[in-house]
Structures are given as C-alpha cells and as structure tokens.
C-alpha cells in the first residue's frame, strides 16, 4: 500500500524523520509559508485593527506583531528541521509522548479544524455573494462551503509536494494581483479617508500586537509541520522570515487601507466594486486554497498521533479532518472569529514556553540532547497551565509574552530543582 501511495505522489512520511534527500530548498518552503499568510482572514485582521485604532497604529502593531511571530516561528521551526519531524513529535520533550498525543496534538488539531472552518465559511459566503450579485446565479452559502471545502482538501491529501506546486503558481500571482488591486481601489475611492483619524479607538497599540501574535499562535506552534522539510537552520530562518513577514504585513496593510478608503477590508469584494468580479473571485479562491490546504494538512498529521494511526494513514486522516472542518463551517463557526483568535492565543502560546525551554535551554539547542518520556511530562503540563493562568489573570503589560516567559522560566527551575531530565 505504501509503495502504491508513493507511486501516486501521496506523501507517506508523517511522524517519522524526513530523509535528507526528500527535503526542499528554503524558497519552496517560503512560498508555502507565504501562501498560508495570504488569505481573507489576514485581511480581516487588518480591518479589525483599523476599526479599533488609527491607521498608523494598525500598521505599526501588525508589523511589530509579525516581527515577534518570525522569532517564535523560527525557534519552533528550527526544532523541526533539526529533528526532521512535525510539531506533534517535537513537543514530546516538554510534554512527554502521552502529553503530546492527548493534549498538544488535540489543541493543534482543534485549532487547525477551526481555521479550516473559518476559511471555508469565508470563501463559501463570499463565493455565493459574488455569483448572486454579478452573475445572477443563486448558490446557497452552505452548498458553496461544501464544494470548496472538498476541493481544497485535494492538495492537502496529497501532501507537501502538492502544497509546493500550488504555492509556486498561486503566491507570486496573488502578490501582484492584490497590490495592483490596492492601487486600483485607491484610484477609484481616493485617498481622503486615509487621513481621517479614528475618533474612538477601542484598542491600544499593545493590544493590537497581542491580537496579531494571537492570530498566528496556531501557525507558530505548528511551524515544524512544514519546516521539517528544511535541510538547515539557515534555510528555516530564511523561509520563516521571508515567507511569513512580507506576506503577513502586506495583508494587514491592505486590509487596513481597504477598510479605510473603501469601507471593506476584503480585496476580493473591492475588485467586484471596481468592476472586475471575475478577478475578485479568482483571488478569493486562490487565497483561500493556499491557506486552507495547509490547515487540513496539519490537522491530518496531528490526527495520526491523536488516534494512534499507522504512518501511511495521514491522507485518510487529512480527508476526515477537512470534512469535519467543512461541517463546522456550515454550522457557523466563523461567526466568532475575533474571540476565536484570543482563545487560540491564550491556550497555545504558553505551550511554546515549555517547548522552547526544553529544547533551547535544557537541551542547549542540540538535537542529540532531545529526549522524551513515554508518559506525561507533568512538569511541562503544570508550567503550561501556570503560563495560561498568567495570561488570563494578569491582563496588564504584554500578556502573551508574560505567559510564555513564565512557563519557560518555571519549567527550567523545576527541572533543575527536581533533577528530572526527560529521558526516553
């Protein structure tokens, strides 16, 4: 069966180490990372920031947030390239094999299904609106969600090589088209509104940074799912910095500017308003596809560990995960988008404190020192919960940074005090 799947180009390496001869150059991985960032929810983030503060502060907070994301993404991603395994395996050092399986994989699995639901819902609703408004075809949103949810699963089921091919074509085209669309919108609507200050800011600069980092919390934690295909640390840093930051910041700026001048953050709908509905529809589909296929892909990897499936069952697990996400979209999951971002950040960010402390401080950043217990690592679980408590109970300063730092420092202290180095 494995040989048959390999001959059909379906990825079969899931939890085991990726062989060096199967790894990719940093540009290929950077395109996959950029494809994750270019999506309607990324534009929505810019729109939320613009509605809550001045345009200047929206862009500043988004940019600073993504600089922080690059650091977290690189540190988590290097673990993947060092060890050659996905996130659900790299976290075993800090949480133990059972902790990784029953806690962290579950969190990532739920997060990725949630993101798949959000993307599918946005795509389905927008597609139905576009076909009804400009082509006079009435397609129920639920039907659109099901159709596009299933279509976007195809590349995810095939795995990393399908993601690579999709993003090679889609990402450069999306960069060009969205930038051109911004200039066309500015030409149509003018720039007067850009200089109108928000009279009632509801979010501080720090809160905007927190929202941006929370937006990418699941992506940072799951970084190794993609970076395990990098050969070196340098490649991982390059793909993370050049893949994530430019695309992320561009989406924040576009979303904020469009919300300011056109009263609409979604560039795909702006294309329709300026008389290019077909292009708007193509951008909508391509942008959602490049992101959502990765959500389903990561969900499938974590499902293999969660349900203790065989190594070659990732494709099946990915398909089922995507179908669950599609059902969640139909049930209206995306209606709580902003709250969803905060919940993700609160739950996921402190786990990185434990994971990074175990690998980079206790293990001194050396893959040869990486070890994991077969059971739960209760020290890691305790430190994660304390970090989560800090985020929830101390809403001053920069909560996510305080939560990550607390879980990391406490983990190092307890490991030293109890003298319990994690062993296999």
Image (spheres, rainbow, N blue to C red):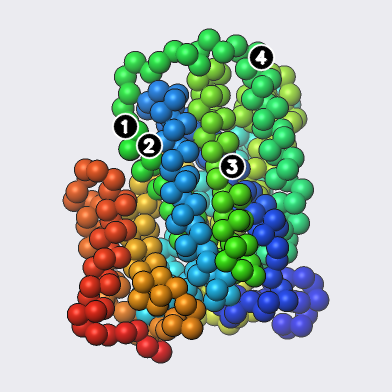
| Position in image of residue 148 (x %, y %) | 66, 48
Q: Whole-Å distance between the Cαs marked 2 and 4?
A: 29 Å
Whole-percent x, y for residue 150 in the image = 65, 54
Residue 293 appearing in the image: no
Q: Residues within 10 Å of mark 1 (few under 14, many from 20)?
A: some
Whichever of labels 1 and 3 marks the residue nearer the N terminus, that label is 1
Residue at far bottom of view: 424
Q: Secondary structure at mark 2?
A: helix
Going from N to C along the chain, the mark reached first, 4 or 3, is 4
Residue 179: percent from the left, percent from the top? Answer: 67, 30
- Judging depth in this view, the residue of 339 and 121 nearest the camera is 339
Q: Identify residue for label 1.
A: 204
Task: Please name the residue shown 68% across and 77% down the image.
Answer: 20
Instruction: Check disc 2 and report the residue beneath it.
Output: 208
Structural distance between the alpha carbons of marks 4 and 1: 31 Å
Q: In this figure, which residue is indicated by the disc labeled 4?
A: 187
Q: Is the C-beta separation of discs 4 and 3 under 8 Å? A: no
SS at circle 1: loop
Against 137, is 230 above or below? below
Tags 4 and 1 touching, CB below 8 Å: no
* Residue drawn at point x = 76 percent, y = 77 percent: 6
**Closer mark to the observer between disc 4 and disc 3:** 3
Q: CA distance from mark 2 to mark 3?
A: 18 Å
The answer to whether the residue labelled 1 contacts the one labelled 3, judged by CB atoms less than 8 Å apart, is no
Residue at 60% across, 63% down: 234
Residue drawn at 22 percent across, 63 percent down = 386
Q: Earlier in the sequence, mark 2 or mark 3?
A: 2
Q: Secondary structure at mark 3?
A: helix
Which residue bears the numbered disc 3?
246
Give how far apart the Cα atoms at labels 4 and 3 are.
24 Å
Q: Are marks 2 and 1 in contact (CB under 8 Å)?
A: yes
**Could you say whether the residue bearing mark 4 is in a helix, strand or loop?**
helix
């Amino acid at each position: 069966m494995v040989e048959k799947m390999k001959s059909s180009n379906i990825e079969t390496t899931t939890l085991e180490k990726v062989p060096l001869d199967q790894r990719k150059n940093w540009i290929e991985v950077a395109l996959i990372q950029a494809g994750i960032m270019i999506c309607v929810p990324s534009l929505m983030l810019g729109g939320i920031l613009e509605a809550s503060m001045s345009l200047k502060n929206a862009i500043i907070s988004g940019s600073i947030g993504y600089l922080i994301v690059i650091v977290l993404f690189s540190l988590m991603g290097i673990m993947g390239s060092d060890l050659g395994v996905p996130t659900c395996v790299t976290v075993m050092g800090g949480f133990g094999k059972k902790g990784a399986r029953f806690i962290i994989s579950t969190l990532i699995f739920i997060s990725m299904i949630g993101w798949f639901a959000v993307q599918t819902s946005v795509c389905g609703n927008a597609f139905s609106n576009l076909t009804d408004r400009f082509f006079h075809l009435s397609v129920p949103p639920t039907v659109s969600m099901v159709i596009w949810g299933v279509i976007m699963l195809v590349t995810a089921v095939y795995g990393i090589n399908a993601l690579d091919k999709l993003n090679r074509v889609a990402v450069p085209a999306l960069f060009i088209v969205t930038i051109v669309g911004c200039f066309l919108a500015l030409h149509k609507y003018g720039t007067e509104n850009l200089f109108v200050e928000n009279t009632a800011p509801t979010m501080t600069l720090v809160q905007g940074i927190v929202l941006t980092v929370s937006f990418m919390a699941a992506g940072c934690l799951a970084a190794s799912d993609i970076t395990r295909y990098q050969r070196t640390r340098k490649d991982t840093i390059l793909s993370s910095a050049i893949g994530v930051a430019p695309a992320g910041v561009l989406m924040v700026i576009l979303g904020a500017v469009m919300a300011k001048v056109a009263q609409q953050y979604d560039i795909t709908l702006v294309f329709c308003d300026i008389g290019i509905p077909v292009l708007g529809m193509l951008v909508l589909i391509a942008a959602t596809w490049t992101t959502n296929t990765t959500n389903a892909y990561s969900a499938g990897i974590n499902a293999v560990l969660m349900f203790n499936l065989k190594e070659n069952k990732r494709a099946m697990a990915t398909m089922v995960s995507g179908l669950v996400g599609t059902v969640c979209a139909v049930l209206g999951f995306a209606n709580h988008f902003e709250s969803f971002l905060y919940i993700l950040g609160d739950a996921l960010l402190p786990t990185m404190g434990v994971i990074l402390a175990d690998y980079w401080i206790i293990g001194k950043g050396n893959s040869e020192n990486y070890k994991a217990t077969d059971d739960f690592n209760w020290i890691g679980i305790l430190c994660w919960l304390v970090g989560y408590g800090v985020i929830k109970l101390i809403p001053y300063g920069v909560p996510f940074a305080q939560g990550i730092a607390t879980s990391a420092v406490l983990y190092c202290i307890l490991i030293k005090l109890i003298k319990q180095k994690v062993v296999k």
